[in-house]
């Protein structure tokens, strides 16, 4: 036990020392205070639809449905207010998908529900830089002498709060049809649950790595898991509603898309479970480019201040 405690203390001391030595002057991080970011990558949805070829596991990356991978794009602004801390405002626009037909799990495959939804999310993140190597290279280039190279590598963790807009759709007669107005689980009808909102609060969690590709540009990769507070991003949450009521009160399209089961229809009758009532989640894997906008250029920022007074003797 004492040996384990000693190793933990040694690692912590080494980590702390490396942080202070790599942030070798205040100017190294303060010249990178403000950045604009843009990038893109892939999305995955974790909810009621699709998933692996077995019973789903809530909030688990083990339930990834790779054939339903879709796209995402992002822009943002990052402000670094401390050597170890930064905050970012990020706009993500992407697509999430889920399809029971892509799994071989018998109940999901028989249920035969599917969806896609555009997701527009604004996040305010707080970032903790846990490892960094930030150093300026030599200021003067002397022929025949090797100068220290520039370094700007970081590993960081982040979380925050956000708000997301979504609009689930399903394909019907060759066209993508919005599901929320169809009240597929009786939402908003006399004997059904309340109609859900097309917006939800979110909490992102993630990790990122970035490195310099010049004095003004950075490139990196970010993995972000987004916890939502809605179970309707895929339009699936509760139990099946009476299809005759949907046909008479809404439309035949609503009745069909509420229950397009392929087989074993007794599993999916009115009142039977349609979803698992767990809040939905999704995640991004993005390649991110960042442009330093703190100063016009480093050379200007690092010039020695001009003497504007007079010498006295």
Image (tube, rainbow, N blue to C red):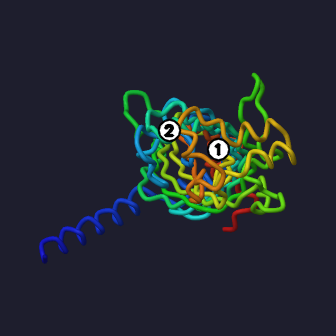
Q: Secondary structure at mark 1?
A: strand
From the image, tell me which residue sits under label 2: 140
| Whether residue 179 is situated above or below residue 88 in the rendered picture | above
Callout 2 crowding tier (Cα within 10 Å): few <14, some 14–19, many ≥20 = few
| Whether residue 253 is situated above or below residue 120 in the rendered picture | above
Question: Is residue 226 or residue 88 the one in the foreground?
Answer: 226
Determine which quarter of the picture holds residue 39.
Answer: top right
**How far separated are the C-alphas under marks 2 and 1?**
22 Å
Q: Disc count in the image?
A: 2
Q: Is residue 221 visible?
A: yes
Question: Is residue 275 or residue 233 the one in the foreground?
Answer: 275
Question: Is residue 205 or residue 246 the one in the foreground?
Answer: 246
Which numbered tag is attached to residue 292?
1
| Whether residue 95 is situated above or below residue 276 in the rendered picture | above
User: Seen in the image, is 263 located left or right of residue 240?
Assistant: left
Q: Position of residue 299 (x, y in %)?
A: 63, 41
Which numbered tag is attached to residue 76?
none
Quadrant (top left/top right/bottom left/bottom right) for the N terminus: bottom left
User: Seen in the image, is 30 located left or right of residue 139?
Assistant: right
| Whether residue 33 is situated above or below residue 74 in the rendered picture | below
Q: Secondary structure at mark 2?
A: loop
Quadrant (top left/top right/bottom left/bottom right) for the C terminus: bottom right
Residue depicted at x 62% and y 63%: 81
């Amino acid at each position: 036990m004492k040996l384990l405690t000693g190793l933990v203390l040694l690692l912590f001391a080494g980590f702390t020392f490396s942080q202070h030595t790599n942030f070798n002057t205040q100017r190294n991080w303060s010249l990178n205070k403000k950045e604009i970011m843009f990038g893109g990558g892939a999305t995955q949805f974790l909810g009621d639809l699709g998933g692996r070829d077995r019973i789903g596991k809530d909030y688990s990356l083990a339930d990834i449905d790779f054939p339903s991978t879709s796209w995402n794009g992002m822009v943002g602004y990052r402000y670094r207010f401390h050597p170890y801390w930064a905050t970012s405002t990020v706009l993500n626009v992407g697509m999430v998908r889920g399809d029971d037909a892509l799994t071989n799990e018998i109940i999901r495959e028989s249920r035969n529900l599917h969806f896609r939804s555009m997701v527009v999310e604004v996040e305010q993140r707080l970032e903790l830089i846990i490892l960094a190597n930030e150093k300026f290279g030599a200021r003067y280039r002397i022929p025949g002498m090797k100068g220290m190279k520039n370094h700007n590598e970081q590993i960081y963790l982040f979380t925050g709060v956000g708000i997301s807009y979504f609009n689930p759709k399903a394909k019907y007669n060759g066209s993508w049809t919005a599901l929320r107005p169809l009240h597929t689980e009786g939402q908003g009808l006399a004997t059904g649950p309340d109609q859900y909102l097309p917006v939800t609060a979110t909490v992102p969690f993630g990790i990122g790595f970035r490195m310099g590709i010049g004095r003004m540009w950075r490139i990196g990769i970010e993995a972000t898991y987004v916890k939502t507070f809605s179970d309707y991003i895929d339009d699936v949450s509760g139990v099946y509603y009476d299809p005759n009521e949907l046909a008479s009160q809404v439309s035949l399209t609503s009745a069909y898309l509420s229950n397009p089961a392929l087989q074993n229809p007794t599993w999916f009758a009115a009142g039977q479970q349609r979803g698992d009532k767990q809040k939905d989640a999704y995640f991004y894997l993005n390649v991110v480019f960042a442009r330093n906008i703190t100063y016009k250029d480093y050379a200007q920022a690092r010039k020695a201040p001009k003497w504007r007074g007079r010498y006295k003797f």
